[in-house]
Amino acid sequence: MRNVSYECYDRVPRDVLPIGTDYEPGYLLDWHTHRRAQFLYSATGSMIAETEDGTWTVPSDRAVLIPAGTRHRIRMLEASTRSLYIEPSAVPWWPRVCTVVDVTPLLRELLLVAVDFGPDYDLAGRAGAVAQLLLFELAGLAPLPLHIGLPATPELGALCREYLAHPEPGVTNADWARRLALSERGLARRFHLELGMSPAAWRVRARLIAAVPLLRAHPIARVAGELGYASPAGFTAAFSRVFGLPPSALHGR
């Protein structure tokens, strides 16, 4: 099925409902929940998934696993998606929090086939076999650490969301402390309490997360410069240290 509303088919007696959707650049799929678990694959472009606890950046050709009942919103950055809405009982291993995953070539081809199935596809035929194979493939996907936590405190959370939208390299702890009417020590204490890291470390991770959608379309040197790094080598070292993979792994794929 393509460009249809999931809600129209939620109660169809199929464990796996494949739906393909095309979005306008920058489209915001605002806060909502699903009764089913969702596998959301970015066939083109990239996406940013957000819950109350954090954000997950999904590069092109990767996917995010969204648990059933999780309140979330998705910003589409020139994205065309392929979704699988899955009965929770069919995936008891599904993660309890959103998780970005790599996508195997076989899974990618199965998705391209499955989005042309009707909602009442034949469980005993080819479509049913593809659906079962999709479940097997999903269970073996490798997670990617493209996530950043957000504070629960409203004023601190708003500050962090603002920074994620515009990650200025020159922002300091003193700047944030003044905005929140805190001392720098008080600011650091609140960050450690809510996120387990310093404000400076959080901003570094935020800038590196912001690099992910840029890497698809721009040279690494340009992305490094935009995010305040003196050299591509310094950016590459920081990216690899934080995420466990080099930016070249996401560049141009």
Image: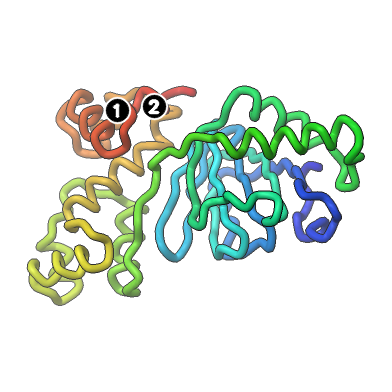
Looking at the rendering, which quadrant does residue 240 occupy?
Answer: top left
The structure's colour scheme is: rainbow
**Amino acid marked by disc 2:** His
Query: Is label 1 in a helix, a strand or a loop?
Result: helix
Q: Position of residue 36 (x, y in %)?
A: 68, 58
Q: Residues within 10 Å of mark 1 (few under 14, many from 20)?
A: some
* Vertical order, 236 against 242 (above or below): above
**Image side of residue 103 versus residue 192, left or right:** right
- Depth check: give the residue in front, 9 or 126: 126
Query: Is label 2 in a helix, a strand or a loop?
Result: loop
Read off the residue under disc 2: 218
Q: Position of residue 69 (x, y in %)?
A: 61, 65
Q: Position of residue 1 (x, y in %)?
A: 81, 42
- Which numbered circle lies on residue 146? none
Looking at the rendering, which quadrant does residue 41 occupy?
Answer: top right
Read off the residue under disc 1: 222
Q: Position of residue 94 (x, y in %)?
A: 57, 50
Q: Residue at left 39%, top 26%? A: 218
* Count of numbered marks: 2
**Amino acid marked by disc 1:** Arg
- Depth check: give the residue in front, 32 or 102: 102
Q: Residue at left 56%, top 35%? A: 140
- Depth check: give the residue in front, 198 or 218: 198
Check contact, mark 1 vs mark 2: CB within 8 A.
yes
Looking at the rendering, which quadrant does residue 245 occupy?
Answer: top left
